[in-house]
Amino acid sequence: MSKHHHDHDEGSRFSDVELRVRALESLLVEKGLVNPETLDKLIDTFETKLGPRNGARVVARAWVDPDYRQRLREDASAAIAELGYSGMQGEHMVVVENMPQVHNLVICTLCSCYPWPVLGLPPVWYKSNAYRARAVADPRSVLKEFGVKLSEEVEVRVWDSTSEVRYLVLPERPDGTQGMNEEELAALVTRDSMIGTAKL
Amino acid sequence: MNGVHDMGGMHGFGPMERERDEPVFHYRWEARTFALRQACGALGKWNIDMARHANERIPPAEYLAATYYERWLAGLERLLLESGVLAQSELATGRSAGPAPAGLVAFPPEKVEKAVRAGRNYRVDTPIAAGFAAGAHVIARNINPTGATRLPRYVRGKRGTVDRDHGVFIFPDTNAAGQGQKPQHLYSVQFSARELWGVEPASKDRVYLDLWEDYLEHA
């Protein structure tokens, strides 16, 4: 009776896909092809070391330092590496600048390409069928859904990440922030503003 | 391939579903799947273009029914089978049927941080002449390869302008097929939204794609 109970509990606790992943991991570990500590370390890296706070520091530096902004324009990968951010899915960076008459939006219609070192892993909506399908053909309706309304005078530039080049949007510095230091400015910068689905 | 993954311009997927304070992974199995993909990729049995193409080859109905990390899992299983790392019987039973192929070593945890920070280099330092200069008028070729390609359907046959030359890069179409890197120039090419989508978009709007030399011809 208690055995039955136990099985029932197990059955409701693990979904089919979860069991499939556990089986695959244990098989690969048994064969000496995967070290589970490597998996723990990878997960920790992506959960705690990478994320949009990195990109926010790049943006804030560009706002306060015109020479840095120029280096970002000329070789974004090198300029971003100056702040300690580099690596997988950010090997070949390009920074695109928002201006009063230009708004940039980054997408990946074919999969989910995204600049990991500066933004971390992408949110679910970025990887969704809806965003991949719509943002390239009708960016203004997508932006409106995100609460960004642009006049017809503003040129929308959509960047479809079809290669290993990764794009980061440099949002415009908000008005009224003249007195802020770099750290305070970085705190204003949101993930979505660096994808292009938000303005600051 | 003209797969369902090539979604640019499709209709009917509804609104974006956004989540406040979204976690990096929603379930532990998603995190494990992500990490397994990276750790198995480090075995060196396939390259990034083969890995992407494994996901693209998930049958269309399954692809659409799957969540993001379910696609990653299905792609990983496919890669492990096709590269001979695992046998079908092992995947089916979850039990090892023998030793792993010789020479394959599990990626060690102490090298993770360095590997993530280093990434890989997809640029190739081979001097190859560029067929197009910034400002050149080009047409994206109307080709329909059945293998991997990074030339989306929505841009084929359309006229654009080279915005910049990114340099010489590995060509995914051959790299995914195990037919070599075929290094060539990669360009950022600008298309007017109206060239791609007709008269409805705002006249100033532009779409930029990164396109390889082999995808382009002079307009």
Image (spheres, rainbow, N blue to C red):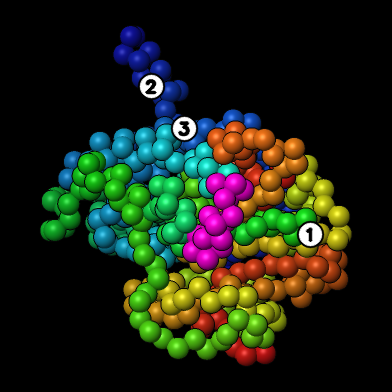
The nearer-to-camera label among 2 and 3 is 3
Label 3 belongs to which residue? B27
Which residue shows up at 35% across the image and 49% down it?
B116
The kind of secondary structure element at disc 2 is helix
Which label belongs to residue A101?
Answer: 1
Name the kind of residue labelled 3 in the image.
Tyr
In the image, residue A124 lies in the stretch drawn in magenta: no
The nearer-to-camera label among 1 and 3 is 1
Mark pair 2, 3: CA separation: 17 Å
Is A6 located above or below residue A29 in the figure?
A: above
Part of the protein shown in magenta = A61-76
Image quadrant containing the C terminus of chain B: bottom right
- Foreground pick, B214 / B187: B187
Dot 1, how many residues are within 10 Å of its Cα: few (below 14), some (14-19), or many (20+)?
A: few
Which residue shows up at 53% across the image and 55% down it?
A68
Disc 1: host chain? A
Q: Are marks 1 and 3 on the same chain?
A: no
Mark found first going from the N terminus, 1 or 2: 2
